[in-house]
Amino acid sequence: MKVLIIYDSVFGNTEQIAQAIGNALGSKKDVEILRVSNVKPEQLTGLKLLIVGSPTHGGRPTPAIQDFLNKVSEPAIRGINVAAFDTRFSTRLVRIFGYAAGRIADSLKRNGGTSHSVTRRFFS
Ligand SMILES: Cc1cc2nc3c(=O)[nH]c(=O)nc-3n(C[C@H](O)[C@H](O)[C@H](O)COP(=O)(O)O)c2cc1C
């Protein structure tokens, strides 16, 4: 199974989660973990599962993740299973702004991804 995990991270929390998911899913041969700034379009071909994670910034994914999502074309990920996760403040006060994972998953599904689930991790 070829799995690609794409993440952005400013302070390292989301990177840690990406690494933990990658380690849990399989060997380095099958699972690639890339910071979003290092992703090239051709790396999206031939995947079984694409996972995208971002810190929540102002209720959204980071600009780099949003930029990546805007560039993902429908044929590139049609039929690929997609999943999303985010990291966020643990306080409930910010929840009115929403969180990154749902927006990432919606975008991937709009572009042809076949399924999604949302993994959440809380940081204060
Ligand atoms: C500029 C900025 C904006 C943030 N906005 C939100 C937010 O709207 N909601 C939230 O729950 N957390 C917010 N956070 C908290 C981060 O999502 C959280 O600390 C995250 O784990 C950081 O991930 P990183 O270590 O991978 O950069 C914000 C943090 C920063 C620095």
Image (spheres, rainbow, N blue to C red):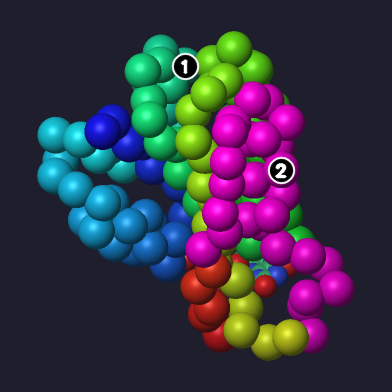
- Residue 74 is labelled as none
Residue at image mark 1 = 41
- Where residue 99 appears, x then y in whole percent? 71, 63
| 29 and 89: which is toward the camera | 29
Residue sitting at 15 percent across and 41 percent down? 28
Tell me: 38 left or right of 66: left
Looking at the rendered structure, the kind of residue marked 2 is Asp
- Where residue 2 appears, x then y in whole percent? 28, 31
Looking at the rendered structure, the kind of residue marked 1 is Pro
Q: Which tag is nearer the camera, tag 2 or tag 1? A: 2
| 123 and 76: which is toward the camera | 76
Bounds of the magenta segment: 93-119
Q: Is residue 32 above or below residue 118?
A: above
Local secondary structure at mark 2: helix
- Where residue 77 appears, x then y in whole percent? 54, 22
Tell me: 20 left or right of 65: left
Residue at image mark 2 = 106
Tell me: 103 left or right of 85: right
Residue sitting at 34 percent across and 63 percent down? 16
Residue sitting at 50 percent across and 73 percent down? 121
Residue 102 can be seen in this image: yes
Q: Is residue 100 above or below residue 49?
A: below
Which quarter holds ligand 1? bottom right
Q: Verify CB contact (< 8 Å) between mark 2 and mark 1.
A: no
